[in-house]
Structures are given as structure tokens and as C-alpha cells.
Image (tube, rainbow, N blue to C red):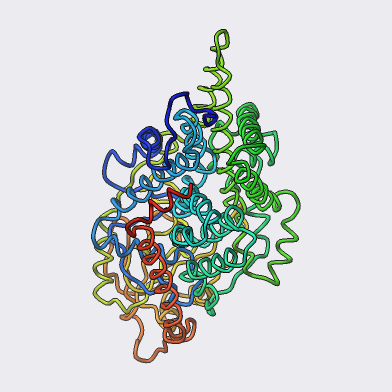
Amino acid sequence: MRPEGRPRGRPAVTPSVDRADLGWSVLLTLAITGPLLLGSGFWLVGDMVFVPHQPWKSAWLGLDGSLPRAVPMDAIVSVLTQVVPGSVVQRVFLVGALVLGGVGIGRLVHERAWYARAAAIGIFLWNPWVHDHLQIGQWAILCGYLALPWVALAARRYRRDVRAGWAPVAVALTISGVCSPSSGVMAVVVVAVLGLRRSWPSWSVLAALSLVANLPWLLPSLLARSSTVTTAGVFELFAPRAESSLGVLPSLLTLGGTWKSSIVAGERTSAVVVGLALALTLAALLGALRRARSGPAAAEVRRLAVLAAVSLAVASVPALGGAGLLEALGERAPALALLRDAHRFLAPAALLLAVGLASAVAWARAQVAPGRESLWTVAGLLVVAPVLLLPGLAWGAGDLERSSYPADWQTVAERIGAEPEATTIVLPWAGSYRSFDWADGRAVLDPAPRYLPGEVLIDDRTFVDGVEIASEDPRVGAVTLALGASGPVDVARGLRRLGVTWVLVERGQVDQSVPAGHTVHDGEDLVLLDLRTTTDPGADPDPLRSTARPSHGDYAPLVITGHVGAFVLLIGAFGRILRPGSNRRHSSRR
């Protein structure tokens, strides 16, 4: 009996890169990232901050005592930008991840005909989850999402044979952990749900691989003695929200519902559009249900359904009255702060929708017969529906223009770089996001810590709907007190006592008084002040560096050991996969 949805006479397709899958993935990727590829400059929006050359800092490996936000991804970006410009690195990450994500979904449903695979690729690459995280600028988390098909493929192999499958799982888990802590956690859950068997080796090997793969961010998190995690009110602030009058559940069921309503695509505010998207989700679920009843993939689809249900539950709890409970639990277990942006954990549900929609398209095609040619239209609509229902994702989500840093930034970076041990603070001291005229006025995370060498401290408080989320860095409070002194000279003295050498003032932001100091650079966009000419540096202690942060030597060997362990695991796993004859043995077990 031929596989369902595959034309008669067509040989079974092995799970390799299909030209149709690659072509469709590239086409959708170009439709999204086209504006970025047509000229120089960067996409700077939200958390997506790339700079021409990101200097190396111990923080990139989690050695500075702070909570790891982009460890070790920032380290990788820093190394790469020493070889090629940051604008190229950004393009490679975004375009490469999107294309690989599409190809991965194609391999996940490789037994389907090309049009069914096209539907799966379409709904996986073109959906509100992708749109919203691109608009928020969470590019690393987006990369982790796009790695999920490969995680699922590794889990499939692991379930068949632990000995043959541990290496692909190790690679998938390590790469996901590099993307972000939440991506690392999601990858472990995906492998656990899809790949575990009722055997001790299956569980023990996965536990060991999961631990080692996530050590680069896990160890700095456990050893971040100079940072504090707050969960007060955060679950409610970052809870998923309804996009239309249909409510929050229909938004979540269609992979929407982000907490940041200002970046939602305009069409998603229409109840009609969300309702049609809900119909598409229903078609995918019916396709998955049909697939789960029988056939060789039935067990896997049932596991995908469990995974999707867990993802939906985690994402919806804060929005359905569970924020208070999570906050209470977070007071006792601060690690729950990882779940504060619950919407991102909806990501694994996209795997079920992709597999289910491929099955629905295959079913519609199978019903085509003389007199029923109109069903071709149904199949075609299911393929293009994700794009038709979300045109706002096209061409850089409609409003992502390229931006270039003014010359002031490089001038200041070179001046500060002459004294790499100096500490810089950035004014205005009013939160971590900026709105620069040269960046099209979009809210973007202050690029100073990534652009400037040395220790750069910004006010990392976050403001959501007028509510302040406290800083996790105790140094921020110390600088805030110093800035509150009565006059510019007293402010300068207070900052010098904290070990601050430079004050960078970013023009065009909210007004704020500046301390007394020697103006080293006065440009159209940036002003750099040297505080050492105002006070006597020899008479002042340096507690900002010496007491607010633990010594690197306290735990650096342990953290570095974690990085080395994950790297050795990755290299060893790749070596196992690429060993001559390895792929042939794996193919024989399919």
C-alpha cells in the first residue's frame, strides 16, 4: 500500500533535503527577510541588537556574576564579528535559521507529497508566533524555535535506538541551549515526550545529555550571587493577551496571543481573521487526529498531541487566572521566572500543527476524483492559508527598516577602548530600551553594552504598561542613588566612588542632568564625559567592581568547565554522526 498522500508510482522519499522543500523554504524566507538583504545596515528592534564588531567580555560566558541572558550566544556573536561584520552575522543567523527550520519540517513529514510538505513548512514558518518574536527582536529564541523540527527528528531516532540516536540528540540539545535557556528547556521537553522509552538507558542517557548540553547557561544561573530574580507581578504583566474580541484562547490556538499588544499584526485584531485561522488550526488538528488513528506514524503523532497540549497549558495558565499562583510559587522557587513570558513556550505546538496540516492536505488531495476536482482548490488553500491570513509578516513584518550606527558610536568605542579596564555608565538612566531617530524610532535595547568595550552599565529596569520591573543587578540601585545627589559635582563624586570613569550621554532621549566632568567627545548623537578630572581618583574606593560582583576566580573554573563540557559533547556527537557508515546504519533502521 502506498503512503497516504503520495502519488502512485512515486518512490518513497528518504529524509534528505528535498529540492521542493528547500525552494519553498527559501522563498518564504526571502519574503520575510527581503528588506534586510537588499542593502547595508542592521535590523535593530526590541532585543535584536547587533553591532559592527562586538568586543569580547567575560559576561558573554557568564563570568561576571549576572544572570545569563544570552550565554553563550553573545560569546559566539562576539567571536564571529571579529571575523566578519555584525551585519553579515545577523543575516546569516536569521536567513539560515528560517531556511533550516523549513527544511527540518519537510524532513519531519518526508513521507508526504511535495504539496503536503509545503503546507507543513508554510504554517511552521509563517505564523503569528514567528511574527511576534521577530517584532519583539527575540532573534535567538526564534532560532531555538526553528531548531525544533531537528530536535523532533533527533528524538525520533533516539526512540528507535538509544545507541544510534544519542549523538543527534546531543547536537540538537546543545544547539538549542546555545540559543537561549528557554530554548534549551523546550528542546529537553520535546525529546523527553517524543523520544523516551520505558527503559533505564533511555532515561539516564537523556538526563546526562540534557545536563551537559545546558551547562553553559545553567551553571552561571546557579552561581549568579550578585543578581536577584524577581517574580512579583511579572506573570500577570507578561501573560498572553487576546488579539481580537474572540478572546485569548483562540489567539493561543492559532499561535498568537503575545503579551506585547503594540506589535500584533493589524489583521490579527480582526475576529474574522482569527476565526479563519482557528478554522485552519481545526483542519490541522483533524488531520493529526486522522493520522494518529493508524499507520506507522500514529504513535509519534499522539506524542506530538501531548506535547502541544502541555505547551498550550503552560502558555495559557497566566492568562486564565494562574498568574497569582505562579507568582506565589516563584517566591519559593525563583527558577520559575523562566516562565514569565509564557507565550514563547507555545512554540512546540507548531510541530503538531505542521504535521497535522500536511495530513489534511494529503487527505484533500486523495479525495480528488472525476467530478470532484474542486478539492484541488481546498488542498491549495490549505497550503497558502498561513500566508493569506498573515500578510503582515511579509517584507520585514511591514515596518522593519535597516538602520546604521552614526559615526559617533565608533569614535566613542575607540576612545573607551584605549582604557579597557574603565567602567562606563549610560545616560539617561531611565530603563534599558531606547528610541533613536537613526533607528526609525523603534524601541530597541540599548546597544552600548555590546558596542562599547569594557564594563558598561545601563539602567536595566523594564517598564511594561507603566509598571516597573526592578533591576536584577544591585549596582543599578547604587548608581541610581549616586545620580540623585544634589548637584553635578556631587553626582560625579558619587559615581567615582563607585568606580565609574566614563559617562555616556545618548542624545535625543528623555532629559536628565549630567554629572560634572571633562567632555571628551561632543557629537550629534553621543556625548562622552571623563569623571577623573572632577574628583581625585586616588582617594576614592572602587566598590562597584570590587564588592558588587564576586571575583571571577571564585567560580570561573567551574563555569568554564561547563562550557568545555558542552563543546566536547557537541564535537563528539558530530564526530559520531559523521563517522563513515553511520548514516547507512541509521537508514537501515528506518
Q: Is residue 441 visible?
A: yes
In this rendering, position of residue 310 left or right of residue 135: right
Q: Is residue 388 visible?
A: no
Residue at the image point whose x is 60% and y is 65% from the top: 203
In this rendering, position of residue 578 left or right of residue 145: left
Nearer to me, 57 or 214: 214
Counting from the top left corner in percent of width and height, residue 495 is at 43, 78
Image quarter of the N terminus: top right
Query: Based on the displayed image, in which of its 4 quarters is residue 189 positioned?
Result: bottom right
Nearer to me, 424 or 134: 134
Residue at the image point whose x is 68% and y is 55% from the top: 236
Counting from the top left corner in percent of width and height, residue 262 is at 55, 43
Residue at the image point whose x is 66% and y is 41% from the top: 242
Nearer to me, 373 or 35: 373
Extreme residue in the top direction:
371
Extreme residue in the bottom direction:
539
Query: Based on the displayed image, in which of its 4 quarters is residue 329 positioned?
Result: bottom right
Counting from the top left corner in percent of width and height, residue 460 is at 50, 65
- Establish if 191 lies above or below 28: below
In this rendering, position of residue 432 left or right of residue 87: right
In this rendering, position of residue 436 left or right of residue 79: right
Q: How many marks?
A: 0
Query: Based on the displayed image, in which of its 4 quarters is residue 85 positioned?
Result: bottom left
Nearer to me, 161 or 221: 161
- Establish if 118 lies above or below 447: above
Counting from the top left corner in percent of width and height, residue 195 is at 57, 55
